[in-house]
Image: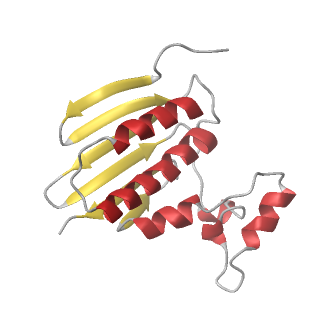
Amino acid sequence: MVQWDDGIELLSAHPRWITLRVRCRRLTAERLLQFCEELKIHLPVEDRQNMGLAFREMLMNAVEHGGKFHPKRWVEVAYLRTDRLIGYRVSDPGPGFTLAELPHAAVSNPPDDPSRHVAARESAGMRPGGFGLLLASKLVDELIHNEQGNEVLLIKYLQ
């Protein structure tokens, strides 16, 4: 079934604080990511690309794992800009997680077995992957989850 509405609602439009609600659909998330690429956030190219990739990983995790790609569920995202930092906040409708519950994610691998999650993904019938959290944590200055595990902050400090 095709849905013709945009699936993106504007909640706050301040130039330094933009908040949106996004339907848990892959197409809608991709449209939002294209919009974010066009934001003029005045960062060096490498920092801009790193923040964009980290945001992409967290948004897609929220839509897939928190919202289960269900078009009646919503993810809330925010972009914040201060004189000292740029941040993204992603909050999903799911029950959340702890790292102990993620044997299928590379972030849970022990240092002596960096690919252990691959076997966990195969045995669970999951597609290849599982690098999103680990990758995102390496691309930003801070990645912080709330206690429930269904909300994340990505922070890049400005010079």
Q: Position of residue 153 (x, y in %)?
A: 38, 54
Choose top left, top right, bottom left or bottom right for residue 113: bottom right
State the count of labels: 0
The single residue placed furthest to the bottom in the displayed view is: 112
Q: Quadrant of the N terminus?
A: top right
Camera-nearest residue between 103 and 15:
15
Q: Nearer the viewer, residue 98 or 21?
A: 21
Residue 73 spot, x, y in % from top left = 55, 27
Q: Is residue 13 left or right of residue 128?
A: left
The residue positioned 59% from the left and 41% from the top of the image is 66
The residue drawn where x is 38% and y is 24% is 9
Indicate the quadrant where residue 46 lies: bottom left
Q: Would residue 145 appear left or right of 24 to someone viewing this image?
A: left
**Image point (66%, 60%), residue name:** 130
Q: Height in image: 149 above or below 100?
A: above
**Is residue 24 depicted above or below 109 in this figure?**
above
**What is the residue that sits farthest to the right in this orientation?**
123
Colouring mode (rainbow / by chain / secondary structure / one colour): secondary structure
Q: Residue at x 47, y 56 (%)?
A: 147
> Would you say residue 74 is visible in this rendering?
no
Q: Is residue 33 visible?
A: yes
Image coordinates of residue 146 in percent, x first then y, are 44, 54
Question: Where in the figure is residue 59, as x and y percent of width and height?
Answer: 49, 45
Please identify the quadrant where the C terminus is shown. bottom left
